[in-house]
Amino acid sequence: MRFEHLQDWLDWQQTLHSEKIKLGLERVARVARELGLMRPDFRVVMVSGTNGKGSITAILESIYHEAGYRVAAYTSPHLLHYNERIRIGKKNVEDAPLCAAFDLVDQARGDLSLSYFEFGTLAAMQIFSTLELDVAVFEVGLGGRLDAVNIYDADAAIISSVGLDHVQWLGSTREAIGLEKAGIFRTGQPAVCGDSDPPETLLKYARDIDSRLYLVGEDFSYRQGSDGHWSFQNAKLDWDNLPAPNLYGDVQVANAAAALMSIQCLDEVLPVQRESVERGLQNICLSGRFQRVVGKCEMIFDVAHNLDSAKVLGKNLLELGPASRTYAVFSVLEDKDVEGIIGSVCEQIDEWYISELDSERSLACADLQDCIVRLDPEAIVHACPSVEQAWQAVNKGACETSRIVVFGSFLTVAEVLSFEL
């Protein structure tokens, strides 16, 4: 074995491939064929979307687990530990099987270069192949058509939403991005779209390949009640008084409805009763999605990093009601819609603590400060050398009636969570 410890494997993988993001299926499919992974014995559910795909993956994982199925999930990125990316029975994989899987992938690849994400995807597939699984839920890393997980043919595919993000890889319009995400659809297989205004390219692609596409508002619907419960309807079901997902925000009901529609699509092979749905919705575990933690004051951790997710964050903060003072710990990557993100939340922020991220794609602190002040000339902005120092500085001024919001990137949230939890 090349390395004995997980961190050594991960450090080495970061240096193996010249490009951090390299879309395409040829490399990962070649290694998967060498490992005999191309025809899984379990059902595959694929989840893509600009926002909400992590929540939908967690909802599916929780419901299938409560239904008694042997379920696995593959997600990215992680917050605190790489092991979070691969879960079996809602538990993170241990270091030993991860290292063993990395070793098999390393041997099978020969002199072929793999990206960090491709290595992890193949390791997950290798681990899943050794287990007697009923279903595995794969969260698409980027796009869909050329993402590494798409070497598998999904038994059911879900697209949560289509918005503008990762435009340098996926295209600069919703039509272009929608087509890339629709690449996870398969002929004759069910696909679910939770976007209420899907791009025509997505609809046309589903028609062209004869995928059975289920659209929110047409083939299924949901309704939120004033008491925190909700209802779901499709051609076969009319369920009232469902418990809200154990995730904050109205948008999570929309995510749950898309997940429930896909579960219904596979009901003949993986039947799920209402009782399992209710338990699954109540027992979801997902960090960093408007995660509220009480300490010295209320702290909110949210991985909002694009325009649509920032709008949801701003709405959620508004619904919480005012604090005596709301502080933001904020860092962002330069390829994001930075003005859109800031503009979506600036009315809810009294004071900003900004820094750069430990990433070559990080937006420079000076540029970030200029952007905030341009949108809000009265903004109070503190530029800090690092996320850690921004966190330390904001804690000095916070009191029990104030609120701290940490957002802008998975990297921002992960770094602060590593200090706090």
Image (cartoon, grey):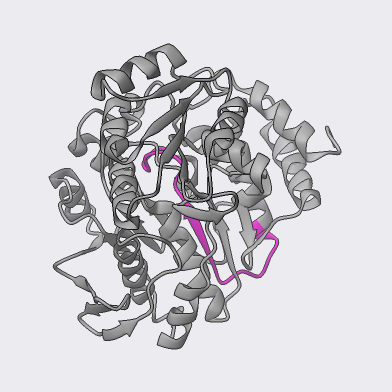
167 with respect to 284 (left or right): left
192 with respect to 68 (left or right): left
Say above or below: 207 vs 355: below
Can residue 34 be seen from the camera position used here?
A: no
Look at the image and give the residue range highlighted in magenta: 128-146
Residue at 30% from the left image edge and 34% from the top image edge: 346
Tell me the chief SS of the magenta region. Answer: loop
On the image, the x and y values in percent for residue 369 come to: 38, 18
On the image, the x and y values in percent for residue 140 come to: 44, 46
How many tags in the picture? 0
Residue at 71% from the left image edge and 33% from the top image edge: 10
Q: Quadrant where the N terminus lies?
A: top right
Residue at 73% from the left image edge and 47% from the top image edge: 101
222 with respect to 286 (left or right): left
On the image, the x and y values in percent for residue 237 come to: 26, 85
Front-most of residues 413 and 73: 413
Say above or below: 230 vs 308: below
Say above or below: 340 vs 326: above
Residue 222 within the magenta-colored segment of the rendering:
no
